[in-house]
Amino acid sequence: MERYARNASCIAEKETEYLHSRHVAIVGLGGLGGYAAELLARVGVGRITGIDDDRVEVTNLNRQLLANEATLGMLKVMAAEQRIMAVNPDVVFRPLNVRLDAENAEELLAGSDLVLDCSDGIPTRLVLEAATERLGIPLVHGAIAGWYGQVGVCFPGDKLLSKYYAGFDGAGAEAAFGNPSFTPAAVAALQTAEAVKVLLQREGILRGRLLYLDLLQHQYDVLDMGENQAREEKS
């Protein structure tokens, strides 16, 4: 357990052993998913499934942990496996080079204890929410747009994303605001923290709530979607 010695003050040895027995699926291995995969591996989650059908491109180099000159053109799932094996070879990483959709979502996610939404489009996020609800799996949502980001936790039945994205479709705000290097790192770190809290049943989980980050003005707000049923209530 020497690898996890610096975790001991905040994550007990028995909890570390428990994390090693858990299986987390990550949907999307871009800006958010690449960071999240490494953070989960470093904290000791034993099994990680990475789902993505894309390859590393030059435009990924500004922000994606898995993107470097050596991985250009490589499948992102293979770049993720290579990175995780270099960080923590005790982790079992399952690379799935496929695009998740309504037809295959349940099959791809079955057997997971928790799912991280690191996707880049509203339709996929809603598919994820529906699939994880049917499977009875918690979902940790993350999204970024320029200097801004959001994180929330959706347990089966919460309908967090359905409430928030009601009336919206498409790629989301990131298409208009861009993607710098620091926002996905910040949001992925918060997603990973929430994932660990859910797996270990810790207090303070963002269940049914969305944490908004404004890294430009350093403003942070939490919207309780259990009380606020429509996105416009935030403004």
Image: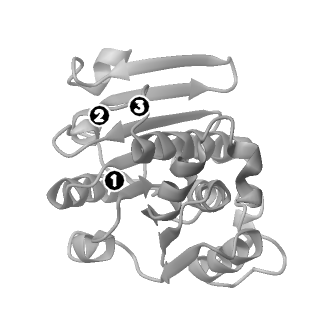
Q: Amino acid at mark 2?
A: Tyr
* Closest to the observer, 90 or 40: 90
Q: In the image, what residue occupies the spot 33% across and 32% down?
A: 207
Left/right of residue 234 with respect to residue 74 in the rendered view: left
| Mark sitting on residue 125 | 1
- For residue 91, above or below residue 5: below
Q: Is residue 105 visible?
A: yes
Q: Earlier in the sequence, mark 2 or mark 1?
A: 1
CB within 8 Å, label 3 to label 1: no
Q: Left or right: 70 with respect to 46?
A: right
Point out the image quarter for the C terminus.
Answer: top left
Residue position marked by numbered label 3 in the rendering: 205
Q: What residue do we see at 15% from left, 59% from top?
A: 134
Please give the residue where the numbered disc 2 appears in the rendered image: 164
SS for tag 2? helix
Q: Secondary structure at mark 3?
A: loop
Q: Which numbered disc, 3 or 2, marks the residue that appears first in the sequence? A: 2
Q: Is residue 173 visible?
A: no
**Residue 178 located left or right of residue 172:** right
